[in-house]
Structure formats: C-alpha cells, structure tokens
Amino acid sequence: MTDTLASNGVTARYRETERERILELESGGRTAVVAQNREGYGMLKVRETAGGDELERYYGFDMALDHAAELLGVRPDEIPVPDPAADLGM
C-alpha cells in the first residue's frame, strides 16, 4: 500500500518494501528519496531515486528532508509528509 500526499507542487509517496520504509518525493521532474531500514532504527539514507546510490546519511528526519528539499529545489516546509512517514528517523 502507498500513502500519497501532494501540495506546493510536491508529491510525496510513502511505501514499505521487505527491507525499507521509503518516502519518494517528486517536484518539477526532480526526485528525491528518504529511506530507513524496515526495523525503524538506523540512519536515514537520501537518494535521488528509490534504487539509486546513497548520497548521504542522517540521524534526523528534518536533516534528511532538508537535503531532499535541496535536491527538489523547494523549501523543506513545502514537502508534504504522509502520516505513516512522520516517524522516520526516530
């Protein structure tokens, strides 16, 4: 199941795979992903795509969203976060 939110020109899709919790973000043809292991602990990984190479790791969700916003060319507060993704990084 995928939870989707869209606002401010940004679409956010949250889903879970066997291994990861994934927040996929898209705006104006640009993409960014914040991923965490399925167990819910460990650092958050920022990538350009879900299957892409890791660009950076962060302990906090806010810092990961800051990096994702930079990749998308938007402000961090413009990124909608579906409810199931709100606890990423905790």
Image: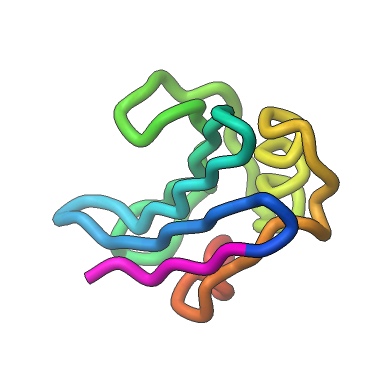
Q: Nearer the viewer, residue 46 or 81?
A: 81
Please report the bounds of the magenta region as a residue range: 1-6
Residue 68: x and y in percent read: 66, 39
The image quadrant that residue 50 belongs to is: top left
Residue 43: x and y in percent read: 53, 47
Give me the residue at 84% from left, 46% from top: 75
Is 18 displayed left or right of 72 in the figure? left
Q: Is the magenta stretch mostly helix, strand or loop?
A: strand
Is residue 81 positioned above or below 62 on the image?
Answer: below
Give me the residue at 44% from left, 61% from top: 41
Give me the residue at 38% from left, 71% from top: 3
Residue 89: x and y in percent read: 57, 61
Is 46 displayed left or right of 76 in the figure? left
Is 3 displayed left or right of 42 in the figure? left
Q: Does the magenta stretch include residue 33?
A: no
Q: Is residue 5 magenta?
A: yes
Residue 21: x and y in percent read: 35, 58
Is residue 59 positioned above or below 52 on the image?
Answer: below
Is 21 displayed left or right of 32 in the figure? left
What's the coloring here? rainbow
Q: Quadrant of the C terminus?
A: bottom right
Q: In which quarter of the image is the N terminus?
A: bottom left
Residue furthest left in the image: 18
Is residue 43 positioned above or below 84 on the image?
Answer: above
